[in-house]
Image (cartoon, rainbow, N blue to C red):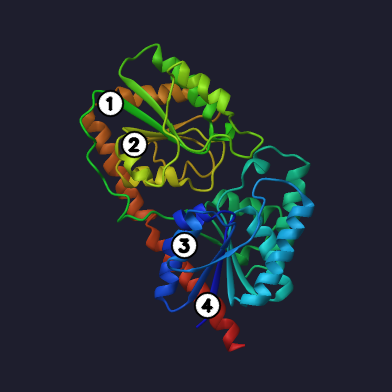
C-alpha cells in the first residue's frame, strides 16, 4: 500500500479543510498520515482515523533558526516513515517540506492556497519568499493554484515552470455539509464577515462601512466570526475589537467548528479582503444560498457574479462597500433568495469538493504510476 503524507501548519486546518481528502485517498487504498503541530483537540480527532505526526512549525514567524529546525525534523521524519508522496498545504510546508522531499527524492505536490500578506506589500521579505518558492517548487512534481492570477504571477516571475502547474476551484465545498437552511424568524437583517481578524481581510473597511450604514438604517446587525490576536503584523488587537463591541458596531461571535450554523442565521456574507486564494467563507456561504459581497480582487472575483449571486466592491473603499451593503438591504426577501439560489447553482457547477478530490487522486495516481513504470 502506497503511503501519502499530508503536511500543514496546524492540526485545525488539517481536520477542518483536508479530512475529506484523506478519506478519499484512504478509500482509494492509500495509507494516509497527517503531519502538523500537535494540539489537544484536533490532533486527537485526526488520530481516531489516521496516523498523526507532530512537527513544530512556526507558522507566522520569520526565524531562520526555527525554520531550519523544522526542515531537520521533517528530514528525520520522512526518513523514518518513508512516504511515497507528500502533499503540502500552507506557505511553510510548501517551501520547507518541498526542499526536504527534493533532498530525499520523494514525490511531492504543493497547493498554493493564497499568497498572504507578504505578497500584498512588496518588501525584502517578499523577495526572500520568492527565492525560497523558486527553489522549493523546483522539486515539485505538480503545484496546484486556486486562481489563475496567482498561477500566472508565479509563472511570469519564473518561480515555477508552466508545465508543472494546474488550477483547482479553491478547496471545493462539501455540498452535503453546506446546504441551504431556512433562517429562524428574525426582524434583523444580519451581515456576517468570516475571517481571521487581519487588516488585510478588510476588517477596517468593514467597520467604517458599518458606521455609515448604522446612521441610516435600524434593525441591521453586523457580525464578525474569526480568531482575534493572531500572530500577524496586520492583526487586529483585542483592544481594538473591544472598542467596536462597546460602541455597538459589531457582534463578535468568536470562533467555531460549526460555521454552517452561523452562516445559516446570516442574510449576507461580506469579505472585503485585499487578496485571496479562493476564500472558503464565500464558497460555503454560496453553497448555503446566501448572497455575498466581496472585493473585486484576485480570489474573490472568481466567486462573485456581480449582480447575480452578490456584489463586487472596490478594494480599500469603505464608502463603496457601504453602497453594496445598502443595495442588499434594499432588495426584497425574494430578490435576496434568488441571489442565494444563483450562488448555490454556481458552487454546484464550479466548486464542488468532488472536483478537487478527483483531481488530487488522478494526479497522485499519475505521478506514482509514472515512477513505477520507470
Where 65 sits versus 206, above or below? below
Q: Nearer the viewer, residue 292 or 48?
A: 48
Nearest to viewer (mark 3 / mark 4) = 3
The 10 Å Cα crowd at callout 3, few under 14, some 14 to 19, many 20 or more, is some
- In the rendered image of this protein, does residue 313 appear above or below residue 83? above
Mark 4 or mark 1: name the one nearer the start of the chain.
1
Secondary structure of the residue carrying numbered label 1? loop
Q: Which residue is mark 2?
A: 291
Residue 147, position as x, y percentages in the image: 52, 51
Give the class, few, some or many, for how many residues have Cα within 10 Å of label 2's Cα (few <14, many ≥20): many
Q: Which image quarter: residue 25? A: bottom left
The C terminus - image quarter: bottom right
Say if mark 3 contacts mark 4, CB within 8 Å: no
What's the residue at 24%, 43% (across, down)? 181
Q: Secondary structure at mark 4?
A: helix
Residue under the image location 64 percent in, 59 percent down: 94
Closer to the N terminus: mark 2 or mark 1?
Answer: 2
Residue 293 drawn above or below residue 242: below
Callouts 4 and 1 close, C-beta under 8 Å: no
| Mark 4 or mark 2: whose residue is earlier in sequence | 2
Amino acid at each position: 500500500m502506497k503511503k501519502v503524507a499530508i503536511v500543514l501548519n496546524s492540526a485545525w486546518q488539517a481536520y477542518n479543510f483536508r479530512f475529506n481528502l484523506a478519506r478519499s485517498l484512504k478509500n482509494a487504498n492509500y495509507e494516509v498520515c497527517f503531519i502538523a503541530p500537535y494540539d489537544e483537540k484536533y490532533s486527537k480527532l485526526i488520530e481516531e482515523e489516521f496516523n498523526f505526526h507532530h512537527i513544530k512549525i512556526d507558522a507566522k514567524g520569520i526565524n531562520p533558526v526555527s525554520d531550519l529546525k523544522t526542515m531537520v525534523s521533517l528530514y528525520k521524519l520522512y526518513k523514518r516513515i518513508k512516504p511515497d508522496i507528500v502533499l503540502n498545504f500552507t506557505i511553510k510546508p510548501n517551501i520547507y517540506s518541498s526542499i526536504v522531499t527534493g533532498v530525499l527524492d520523494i514525490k511531492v505536490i504543493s497547493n498554493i492556497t493564497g499568497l498572504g500578506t507578504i505578497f500584498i506589500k512588496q518588501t525584502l521579505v517578499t523577495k526572500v519568499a520568492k527565492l525560497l518558492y523558486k527553489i522549493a517548487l523546483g522539486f515539485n512534481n505538480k503545484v496546484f493554484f486556486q486562481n489563475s492570477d496567482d498561477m500566472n504571477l508565479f509563472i511570469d516571475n519564473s518561480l515555477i515552470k508552466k508545465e508543472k502547474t494546474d488550477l483547482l476551484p479553491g478547496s471545493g465545498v462539501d455540498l452535503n455539509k453546506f446546504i441551504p437552511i431556512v433562517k429562524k424568524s428574525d426582524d434583523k437583517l444580519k451581515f456576517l464577515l468570516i475571517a481571521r481578524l487581519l487588516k488585510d481581510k478588510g476588517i477596517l473597511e468593514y467597520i467604517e462601512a458599518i458606521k455609515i450604514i448604522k446612521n441610516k438604517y435600524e434593525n441591521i446587525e453586523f457580525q464578525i466570526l474569526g480568531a482575534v490576536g493572531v500572530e500577524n503584523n496586520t492583526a487586529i488587537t483585542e483592544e481594538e475589537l473591544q472598542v467596536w463591541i462597546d460602541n455597538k458596531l459589531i457582534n463578535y461571535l468568536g470562533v467555531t467548528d460549526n460555521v454552517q450554523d452561523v452562516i445559516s442565521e446570516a442574510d449576507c456574507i461580506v469579505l472585503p479582503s485585499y487578496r485571496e486564494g479562493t476564500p472558503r467563507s464565500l464558497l460555503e456561504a454560496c453553497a448555503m444560498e446566501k448572497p455575498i459581497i466581496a472585493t473585486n480582487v484576485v480570489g474573490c472575483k472568481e466567486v462573485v457574479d456581480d449582480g447575480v449571486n452578490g456584489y463586487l466592491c472596490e478594494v480599500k473603499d469603505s464608502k463603496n462597500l457601504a453602497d453594496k451593503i445598502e443595495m442588499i438591504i434594499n432588495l426584497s426577501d425574494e430578490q435576496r433568495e434568488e441571489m442565494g439560489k444563483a450562488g448555490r447553482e454556481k458552487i454546484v457547477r464550479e466548486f464542488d469538493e468532488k472536483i478537487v478530490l478527483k483531481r488530487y487522486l488522478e494526479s497522485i495516481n499519475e505521478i506514482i504510476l509514472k515512477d513505477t513504470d520507470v
